[in-house]
Image (cartoon, rainbow, N blue to C red):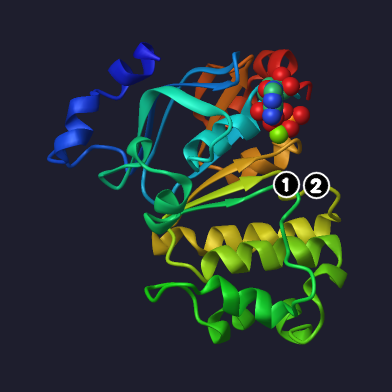
Amino acid sequence: MNAIAVENGVRVGDAAVGVDASRPFFSVRDVHAYYGESYIVQGVSLDIRKGEILALLGRNGAGKTSTLRAIARLDNPQMRHGEIWLDGAPLHRMRAFQAARAGVQLVPEDRRIIAGLTVEENLTLAKVSPGNGWTLERIYESFPRLAERRKQEGVTLSGGEQQMLAIARALARDIKLLLLDEPYEGLAPVIVHEIERILHSIKPMGITTIIVEQNAVAALKLADRAVILDTGEVVFSGSAREVLENTDLRHEYLAI
Ligand SMILES: Nc1ncnc2c1ncn2[C@@H]1O[C@H](COP(=O)(O)OP(=O)(O)OP(=O)(O)O)[C@@H](O)[C@H]1O
Ligand SMILES: [Mg+2]
């Protein structure tokens, strides 16, 4: 969206040469993506500073998951226009495995815990490459529930524990951008708080997070910034607090 590009004073070219110190750490520029001929992501733009948490919100079918998938460079939806930059790297020129190497990790709604593997094996397998990913010790320190259950098969964990394992597995890799699709779904408030605590604690490490949530209030309380999508377009971009305080906006696009 041009309005956003102008608002932030950043042009695509600035990010391309990487000389502008004010350039956002992560930037989506006018991305259009399709499932076959079905036009779903219709010119999405957003910027995030390093270590920020962005809540990506909108009604069912607004295009939130599709936007996360386009950012992670999965084959579907197919991105046909736009640019995506992460810390100076052109994700739009990459395939999914390359984007993963560049530091993008998507935790999908179903969490994809590997059956037949223990908690620890799920974590160990995630450490595919050396780098600054978290060690097992560090993960167990931050996720004591996982430490207690390290020998238990991952798929037998409770929903909340599986979500923690999915996030821990992402942190075991050397990541820059964490994409969470409905991490609180079906979880009790106490578990949601535990996950919020973790997401807060990774901010100072410079990990940038996009959280998609039906529980918009929880996501907005956690997030620094918010983007609201409607039929594949950005209809709001601003601070999370603004959305919390704007009843009209919440009624119109979030039904809260
Ligand atoms: N594989 C697919 N093929 C065709 N259309 C799809 C596919 N996946 C999603 N869509 C369509 O794209 C639109 C956006 O879907 P998406 O899953 O991105 O929405 P969402 O905002 O994540 O919704 P929800 O809150 O229900 O998860 C919907 O109209 C959906 O039907
Ligand atoms: Mg979705």
Say whether residue 61 is visible: no
- Going by the image, does 68 lie left or right of 80? right
Toward which corner of the image does residue 77 lie, by quadrant? top right
Say whether residue 178 is visible: yes
Mark 1 or mark 2: name the one nearer the start of the chain. Answer: 1
Disc 2 secondary structure class: loop
In the rendered image, residue 237, in percent from the top left (x then y), is placed at 49, 23
Q: Is residue 28 above or below residue 108?
A: above
Q: Amino acid type of disc 1?
A: Glu
In the rendered image, residue 89, in percent from the top left (x then y), is placed at 28, 45
Tell me how far mark 1 sits from mark 2, CA to CA: 8 Å
Q: For the residue carrying disc 2, how many other residues have a C-alpha within 10 Å: few (<14), some (14-19), or many (20+)?
A: some
Q: Is residue 227 above or below residue 160?
A: above
Q: Amino acid type of disc 2?
A: Glu
Image point 22% across, 35% down: which residue?
Answer: 15
* Mark 1 sits near ligand 2, with its Cβ under 8 Å away: yes
Q: Are marks 1 and 2 in contact (CB under 8 Å)?
A: yes
Quadrant including the C terminus: top right
Image point 82% across, 55% down: which residue?
Answer: 189
Q: Nearer the viewer, mark 1 or mark 2?
A: 1
Q: For the residue carrying disc 1, how many other residues have a C-alpha within 10 Å: few (<14), some (14-19), or many (20+)?
A: some
Q: Is residue 4 above or below residue 209?
A: above
* Mark 2 sits near ligand 1, with its Cβ under 8 Å away: no
Q: Which residue is mark 1?
A: 109
Image point 76% across, 24% down: which residue?
Answer: 60
- Going by the image, does 83 lie left or right of 234? left
Residue 185 marker? 2
The foreground one among 130 and 159 is 130
- Going by the image, does 87 lie left or right of 226? left
